[in-house]
Image: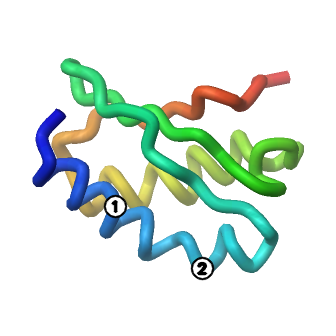
Amino acid sequence: MNASLIDQVELALDSIRPYLEADGGNVKIVEITDDLVLRLELTGTCSSCPMSTMTLKAGVEEAVKRAVPKIIKVEAVNVVIA
């Protein structure tokens, strides 16, 4: 995994972490795949929140893709889409 790419993603995540933390949650990078899919783990209340899918798509993915256009998709490893 490219350390520079991880650093860029971390900076993007840092821009939205205060909002996640305000609700008792957070995210951590699990991996960036060879085909540039960012896999995250939602932690804290984010892991069980019914709005986590929307948070992931509307908040996290948007922030990451805006800051790091190379990332083509963001997915959570621990979110069950109902």
Q: Nearer the viewer, residue 78 or 60?
A: 78
Q: Element under label 1?
A: helix
Residue highlighted by disc 2: 18
Considering only vertical position in the picture, is 25 above or below 29? Answer: below
Identified at 17% across, 41% down, the residue is 70
Identified at 65% across, 46% down, the residue is 42
Of mark 2 and mark 1, the one earlier in the sequence is 1
Is label 2 in contact with label 1 (beta carbons under 8 Å)?
no
Name the amino acid type tagged 1. Answer: Glu
Mark 1 Cα shell of 10 Å, populated few (<14), some (14-19), many (≥20): some
Residue 80, quarter of picture: top right
Measure the alpha-carbon separation of dots 2 and 1. 13 Å
Q: Position of residue 56 (x, y in %)?
A: 60, 47
Numbered circle sitting on residue 10: 1
Asked whether, in this view, residue 60 is left or right of residue 78, the answer is left
Position of the C terminus, as image quadrant, is top right
Asked whether, in this view, residue 77 is left or right of residue 49, the answer is left
Name the amino acid type tagged 2. Answer: Pro
